[in-house]
Image: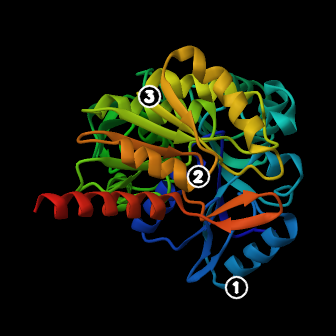
Amino acid sequence: MNKVIEVFGITGTNGKTTASCMLRKILEEEGKVCALIGTIEHQIGNKRYVPINTTPGKELLKELFGEISRQKIKDCVMEVSSHGIDQGRIADIRIAYGGFTNLSQDHLDYHKTMENYYQVKKRLFLQCEKGACINLDDRYGKRLFKELHEEVDIPDIKGYSLKDVNADFYGQITEEKLTGSMFSFYEKGHCLGDLKTKVPGRHFVYNAMLAAAMARQAGISFSAIKQGLRQLEKVPGRMELIGEEADTLGVVDYAHTPDGLEKLLSTLALFKRGRLICVFGCGGFRDKGKRPLMGEIAGNYSDYCVITNDNPRGEPPENICQSIEEGLYPTGCDYCILLDRYQAIKRAVSLATKWDIIVVAGKGHETYQLSGDEKLPFDDRKVLKELLENKYEKTYNETD
């Protein structure tokens, strides 16, 4: 389908969107025109498509790659989901380079076991023609790296790490702030220089490491990597800071898995000066086993939690919240349950005082809520921003 298009396929449980956006920005800094197919949008030149799935169906993919060819675009970064692999959506796509972020519990309503989930992810790399880049600090990544070397004839299989100085690509974090992180980037033991992300969190450094490593595999200059990461201000709904000028900081993030929520909250806990207030829920009819795990994680890191609706779909919201509560209650963290997501965010804002951080997790960039058969308009970022602005405008007027 794509003989002259160099496709960079990125897979994993968390981080696909951020790593993809980073890599695309890097390729553009090198002077390449690069298409993007992913969770937030599919973008080909000036054309933008609203995604139905992270990895589109075969017919839509055929249409998208047809448009890429018509515009004579030579590079494409694509997020590759496990559903997309398992359902054969990418079977006709020639993947030049594959990237692996991590693997943790998610989609077990579909895959049933973590082993099945892993084996599906592994199949992406059987299609890689030029190279593969794997996170060696993830236990499934370490296994994948070993198995690919033993079983697959890929010309260039590389690993990246923040822990193993002997990895093909090694990163050493030198600065961690709420405004981003700085790290030294090593290739085969040689330091090429320092890189900076404008989004906080060690997990974002991992995403930057993958983007930089895949770019180097493809022969991209380090200067383009450095400038590309510097130019990327934010990724929508990924550790997106809201109301930075106010006394209370708001954060909206797509974290909807136990691993994603823990990375999010553990990062924010490093920077909090007051309390950490967490608003979150879980999707209906999706991997019910992760609900108490997320409740426990939220309780362990937060000072107060508001359990609410995510995308309940057709499942009774009370059942979803009860499952979350089973993990949250034993932690001893104070919490309440408010099924209406707007009221839940409003409660968090009303409770917040100076130096507190309010994090609204689970939906990130999404501008809707799936409830029953309805797709209702709802944007966590807009709601949180308006509520924070109203609160501090009222406070200012009262004290003026």
Give residue 140's position: percent from left, percent from top. Answer: 67, 25
**In this orientation, which residue lies closer to the viewer: 332 or 267?**
332
- In the image, is 312 to the left or to the right of 276? right
Image side of residue 125 versus residue 359, left or right = right
Say which of 347 and 367 sits in front: 347
Look at the picture and state if 210 lies above or below 366.
above
The residue closer to the viewer here, 271 or 391, is 391
For the residue marked with disc 2, what is the amino acid? Arg
Name the residue type under label 3: Ser
Q: Residue at x 66, y 32 (%)?
A: 103
Q: Earlier in the sequence, mark 3 or mark 2?
A: 3
Give the position of the N terminus as an image quadrant: bottom right
Q: Pointer 2: what residue?
A: 341
| Residue positioned 43% across, 57% down in the render | 384
Q: Is residue 194 visible?
A: no
Please report whichever mark, 1 or 3, sits nearer to the chain's N-terminal start: 1
Crowd tier of the residue under label 3, counting other residues whose Cα lies within 10 Å: few below 14, some 14–19, many 20 or above: many
Q: Quadrant of the C terminus?
A: bottom left
Callout 1: few (<14), some (14-19), or many (20+) C-alpha neighbours within 10 Å?
few
Report the amino acid beneath label 1.
Arg
- Mark 3 highlights which residue? 302
